[in-house]
């Protein structure tokens, strides 16, 4: 490598390398559109692969704006115009992303930063009369933006563009209360991160919640339509009949009222969302979001691979599991499984009931019994979980991997507590 290259040539080379890597990365998931000039800070314009729509449709799919930066050294700093990152209301543009690259050949690294993260983490400076965000390489390195899983990074871009589609096309409720098209599947991308929680699947729960909202909207809109008729009615006697109909729909006998469902104030759901978002934010701040999500899958796969030759596991067999792991990067170092009889593990009577199961008393079917910053001990009785009907060991193995067993959720919750709440 020629280290005596003039700075202008090195800058051109770095720019070309960054764009080439970014395009290869994006083409895995999106259509990358050609552009002849730098529009809105875009090195690339991307479109979701929606074959049923094109950019000439009246409700065209939202385009993503990608700016690419290459960092040749740790001292490199780039600047991005404020207008590229936020809109005229000073809100982060959900369709703008910054892709940063560093390193050469076998030392390549990619970083994905959203507009919201730019606003939150990087200072705004006035450079020659123009407001720009200062994107320094040390802050990128420590901000948890590195792409460790390409599929998950592309998912995050796609989720954001999916939401941008909804936000750009929907009709907002106004003083005139026009008919509203509910977007039942729209939810912020952060809630699609694969983080287990006590409430349940948040996107599905929000979908069901918005069905309740949609019903309430229909009720309110029906009353609004009747009020609209009153506003333009010339004949008082006709108005009487309209008022009677309104009274039938929203009069309780104790004054005018439009009853709305209690489910609109779903405190449990909103608490779960608040906790989910906090977990994602905390893990991302230390660069371990992807590692945390992957670790549960890693220990599940290692566990079931370890006992696969023992399938099917009898209802009275207990798998005693010992796990060694790296607390700093959440990587699995070693996993051992010892299969014991329930009577030996729980010291319980050996007499089975009519279903062939010995009584283990108040013990759970699975539980984390000990955890530290390097070691985990748990037990698991796979044979006592119903619903697994595959006779083929390979199919049964896949079914186990797809099931969100509580013991693995408990394991991740305790690891998170060790990292973030042990001092509280």
Image (spheres, rainbow, N blue to C red):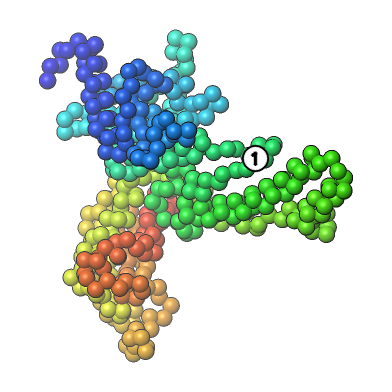
Residue 144 image point, x, y percent: 36, 37
At 40% from the left edge and 37% from the top edge, which residue is drawn?
53
Dot 1 alpha-carbon crowd within 10 angstroms: few under 14, some 14 to 19, many 20 or more: few
Q: Which residue is mark 1?
A: 178
Residue 56 in sight in this render:
yes
337, 174: nearer the viewer: 174
77, 130: nearer the viewer: 130
At 56% from the left edge and 56% from the top edge, which residue is drawn?
268
Residue 71 image point, x, y percent: 28, 24
Could you tell whether 223 is left or right of 409 in the image?
A: right
Residue 251: quadrant of the picture? bottom right
Residue 371: quadrant of the picture? bottom left
262, 331: nearer the viewer: 262
Residue 417 image point, x, y percent: 42, 53
At 71% from the left edge and 45% from the top edge, which residue is drawn?
225
Residue 136 in sight in this render:
no
At 24% from the left edge and 16% from the top edge, which residue is drawn?
12
Could you tell whether 110 is left or right of 249 in the image?
A: left
């Amino acid at each position: 490598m020629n280290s005596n290259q003039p700075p202008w040539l090195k800058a051109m080379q770095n720019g070309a390398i960054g764009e080439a890597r970014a395009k290869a990365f994006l083409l895995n998931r999106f259509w990358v559109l050609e552009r002849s000039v730098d529009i809105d800070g875009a090195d690339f314009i991307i479109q979701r692969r929606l074959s049923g729509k094109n950019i000439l449709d009246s409700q065209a799919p939202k385009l993503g704006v990608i700016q690419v930066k290459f960092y040749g050294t740790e001292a490199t700093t780039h600047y991005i115009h404020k207008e590229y990152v936020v809109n005229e209301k000073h809100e982060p543009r959900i369709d703008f992303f910054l892709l940063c690259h560093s390193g050469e050949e076998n030392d390549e690294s990619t970083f994905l930063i959203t507009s919201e993260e730019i606003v939150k983490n990087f200072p705004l400076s006035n450079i020659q009369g123009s407001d720009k965000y200062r994107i320094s390489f040390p802050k990128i390195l420590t901000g948890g933006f590195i792409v460790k899983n390409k599929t998950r990074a592309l998912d995050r871009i796609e989720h954001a563009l999916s939401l941008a589609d909804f936000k750009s096309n929907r009709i907002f409720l106004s003083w005139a209360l026009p008919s509203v098209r509910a977007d039942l599947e729209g939810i912020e991308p952060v809630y699609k991160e694969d983080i287990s929680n006590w409430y349940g699947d948040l996107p599905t729960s929000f979908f069901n919640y918005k069905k309740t909202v949609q019903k309430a909207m229909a009720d309110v809109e029906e009353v609004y339509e009747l009020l609209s008729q009153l506003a333009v009615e010339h004949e008082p006697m006709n108005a009487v009949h309209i008022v009677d109909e309104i009274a039938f729909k929203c009069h309780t006998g104790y004054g005018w009222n439009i009853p709305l469902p209690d489910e609109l104030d779903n405190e449990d759901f909103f608490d779960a969302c608040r906790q989910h978002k906090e977990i994602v934010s905390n893990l991302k701040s230390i660069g371990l979001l992807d590692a945390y999500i992957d670790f549960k899958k890693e220990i599940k796969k290692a566990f079931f691979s370890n006992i696969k030759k023992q399938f099917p596991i009898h209802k009275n067999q207990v798998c005693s599991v010992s796990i060694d792991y790296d607390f700093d990067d959440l990587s699995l170092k070693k996993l051992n499984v010892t299969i014991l009889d329930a009577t030996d593990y729980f010291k319980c009577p050996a007499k089975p009931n009519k279903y062939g199961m010995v009584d283990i008393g108040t013990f759970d079917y699975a539980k984390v019994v000990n955890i530290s910053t390097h070691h985990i001990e748990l037990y698991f009785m796979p044979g006592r979980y119903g619903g697994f009907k595959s006779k083929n060991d390979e199919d049964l193995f896949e079914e186990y991997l797809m099931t969100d067993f509580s013991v693995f959720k408990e394991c991740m919750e305790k690891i998170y507590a060790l990292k973030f709440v042990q001092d509280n």
